[in-house]
């Protein structure tokens, strides 16, 4: 669907899910454009599950975190998304950040943490 050196977005038809797979650190439009593309795909296909693969994830720049919270998350809330899944291993350096996101997002979505795509 969408593939850059930083992120790959795929539609998982069988799971009615969008998969956002981070490849390496990025910021600004390199970070935001894949997410904008993915949210449009959720509207087009009435996707109900958002999956983020954090295997090669990274901590966001503060300005991108602000954009995520102020612009992107509200667009998710107003979309067909009902469930958010993070692919993350237990000893990931991102676990604290993902746990914080889990708490915040669980106000609006069912949130699940899994160790692999097969665990969906």
Image (cartoon, rainbow, N blue to C red):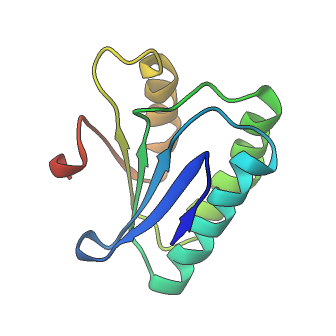
Q: Is residue 3 above or below residue 113?
A: below
Q: Locate residue 87, reporting x and y percent.
A: 33, 39
Left or right: where does residue 23 sit relative to residue 47?
A: right
Of 92 and 108, nearer the camera is 92
Q: Is residue 115 above or below residue 94?
A: below
Q: Locate residue 59, reporting x and y percent.
A: 61, 24
Q: Quadrant of residue 14?
A: bottom left
> In the orientation shown, which residue stands out farthest toward the front?
5
Left or right: where does residue 9 sit relative to residue 12?
A: right
The answer to whether any part of residue 102 appears in the image is: yes
Q: Is residue 111 above or below residue 1?
A: above
Residue at horizontal 80%, vertical 51%?
29
Of 14 and 101, nearer the camera is 14
Q: Quadrant of residue 26?
A: top right
The answer to whether any part of residue 78 appears in the image is: no
Residue at horizontal 51%, vertical 56%?
8
Give the number of marks.
Answer: 0
Residue at horizontal 30%, vertical 77%?
13
Residue at horizontal 16%, vertical 47%?
119
Left or right: where does residue 33 sit relative to residue 99?
A: right
Of 19 and 42, nearer the camera is 19
Q: Locate residue 33, reporting x and y percent.
A: 72, 58
Left or right: where does residue 14 sit relative to residue 28?
A: left
Q: Locate residue 58, reporting x and y percent.
A: 57, 27
> In the orientation shown, which residue stands out farthest toward the left?
119
């Amino acid at each position: 669907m969408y593939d850059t050196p930083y992120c790959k977005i795929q539609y998982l038809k069988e799971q009615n899910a969008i998969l956002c797979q981070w490849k390496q650190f990025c910021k600004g439009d390199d970070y935001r454009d894949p997410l904008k593309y993915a949210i449009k795909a959720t509207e087009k296909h009435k996707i109900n599950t958002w999956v983020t693969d954090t295997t090669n994830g990274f901590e966001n720049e503060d300005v991108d975190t602000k954009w995520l919270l102020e612009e992107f998350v509200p667009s998710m809330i107003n979309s067909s998304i009902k469930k958010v899944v993070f692919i993350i291993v237990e000893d990931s350096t991102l676990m604290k950040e993902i746990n914080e996101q889990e708490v915040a997002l669980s106000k609006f979505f069912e949130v699940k943490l899994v160790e692999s795509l097969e665990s969906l």
